[in-house]
Image (tube, rainbow, N blue to C red):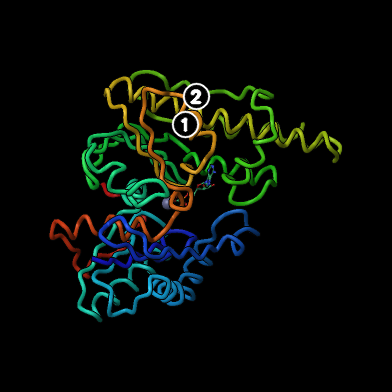
Amino acid sequence: MRVLGIESSCDECAASVVEDGHKVLSNVIATQIPFHAAYNGVVPEIASRKHTEWIYAVVKEALDKAGMKAADVDAVAATARPGLLGSLLVGLSFAKAFAWARDLPFVAVDHMLAHLYASRLDQAFSKGEEVSAAEYPFLGLLVSGGHSIICKVDAFDDITVLGTTIDDAVGEAFDKVSKHYGFGYPGGAVIDKLAESGNARAFNFPLPSLHKGDHRYDVSYSGLKNAVINQFEQFRALPAHEAKEIEEANIAASFQRTAVEILARSLFNAVQDTGLHTIVAGGGVAANSLLRARLAERQDLRCIFPPLELCGDNGAMVAGIAYRYLERGEASPLTVTASARVKA
Ligand code: KG4
Ligand code: ZN
C-alpha cells in the first residue's frame, strides 16, 4: 500500500510517499527558513501563505519522485495537530480534498506520534521494520522546537507522558540563545556546528533543580536560557577578532553540554524507575550530535535515532504512521479539523 503523507504544521512544506509503512519512495521537504530568518523565528502568517503557494508543487514532486501519478496513491494522510493552526489547515485541507476527489481512505495524524514513528522508516543500514516494531514498551524522547517529552511507549499510538518541560522546549532554548547572540536561525543546527570548535567546560551554566519527587522526569530550560543570555554583555564587550570567535564557540559548546545534560538526567531517571532500556528518539533536536553521543555512552541502553533527514519535520513519518492505522482498518472522517494543541 502506497500512502501519500503531507506535513505542514510549522515552516516545512513536506510531502512523501511511503510503501507499507516503512519504504520511503520519495521525501520532499521545501523549507521556508529563508523567509523567516530575517525575523529570527517562524512568522505564522508567512508560514501559512507559503504553504498555500507551495503545497501543490510539493505534492506533485513527491509523486513524480516516487514514479507515480495521483491515480496510483492508495491512501492520503496529513498532520492534524499540534502546530500552527493556519499552517496545519493548508496541508490538512489539501489532503482531505485529494482523498475526497479520488475516494481514498484518509488519516489525520498527530505530529508528535509521527516524530516517534520516524525511526521505523527504512534506514541506511536496516529496515525500519527491524528497528523497533517488536520491542514495545520502550521509552520515547520527543524533542523539537515546541516539545520536550519523555514518555513510555506501548504502541505506535499509545504513549504515556512521564515528563515534559515546565517552561521552554529544548529546541526553543537553542533557537532563543542563537537569536540573542546573532548566531543564526534556526539555532539548533547552528549551535551544534559552532560547538564543535568550542570548549564545553568554558562556562558552568546551571542545571535546574528538578531532580526529585513529581519532577523527576521533567525538564526546564528557562533558567539555562537566561543564564546564557546574561553572558551576552561580556561577550559583546569583546573586540571583534579571534577572541570573539573563540568565545562564541565556547558559549555554544557550554550551553549545548548543559542542554543535553538536562535531558539525559531526566531520561536516565526514567530508565532507572521503569527498567526500560530501549529509547527511541524523534523530533528536530534528535539530530543533535552531542545528544546522540551522550546517550551512546550508556552501553546498557539501546538508543534508536531516526536518520538525520527524518529528525525534523517531514511527510514520510506522516505517511508511515498512517499505514499502521489503515492496517488496523482505521481511517479518519473528512470532518476532522486541525488543532494547535496536543491531544488532551
Ligand atoms: O521537529 P522540528 O523540525 O519542528 C518542530 O516540530 O518543532 O524541530 C525543530 C527544532 C528547532 O528548534 C531546531 O533548532 C531544532 O529542532 N534542531 C536542533 C538541531 N537541528 C534542529 N537542535 C539541536 N541540535 C540540532 N542539530
Ligand atoms: Zn516537528
Q: Earlier in the sequence, mark 1 or mark 2?
A: 2
1 and 2 marks in contact (CB < 8 Å): yes
Check disc 1 and give the amino acid type: Ser
Expressed as whole percent of the image width and height from the top left, the position of residue 94 reads 35, 73
Mark 2: few/some/many CA within 10 Å (<14, 14-19, 20+): some
Q: Nearer the viewer, residue 242 or 16?
A: 16
Identity of the residue drawn at 29% across and 76% down: 98
Residue 155 position by quadrant: top left
Check disc 2 and give the amino acid type: Pro
- Which element type, helix, strand or loop, lies under badge 2? loop
Q: Nearer the viewer, residue 239 or 107?
A: 107
- Which element type, helix, strand or loop, lies under badge 1? loop
Viewport quadrant of the N terminus: bottom left
Name the disc covering residue 208, or none. 2
Name the disc covering residue 151, or none. none
Identity of the residue drawn at 72% across and 35% down: 232
Classify residue 100 as left or right of residue 126: left
Seen from this angle, which residue lies furthest left?
329
Expressed as whole percent of the image width and height from the top left, the position of residue 158 reads 22, 43
Expressed as whole percent of the image width and height from the top left, the position of residue 274 reads 27, 24
Name the disc covering residue 220, or none. 1
Identity of the residue drawn at 23% across and 47% down: 157
Residue 132 position by quadrant: top left
Classify residue 77 as left or right of residue 204: left
Is label 2's Cβ within 8 Å of ligand 1? no
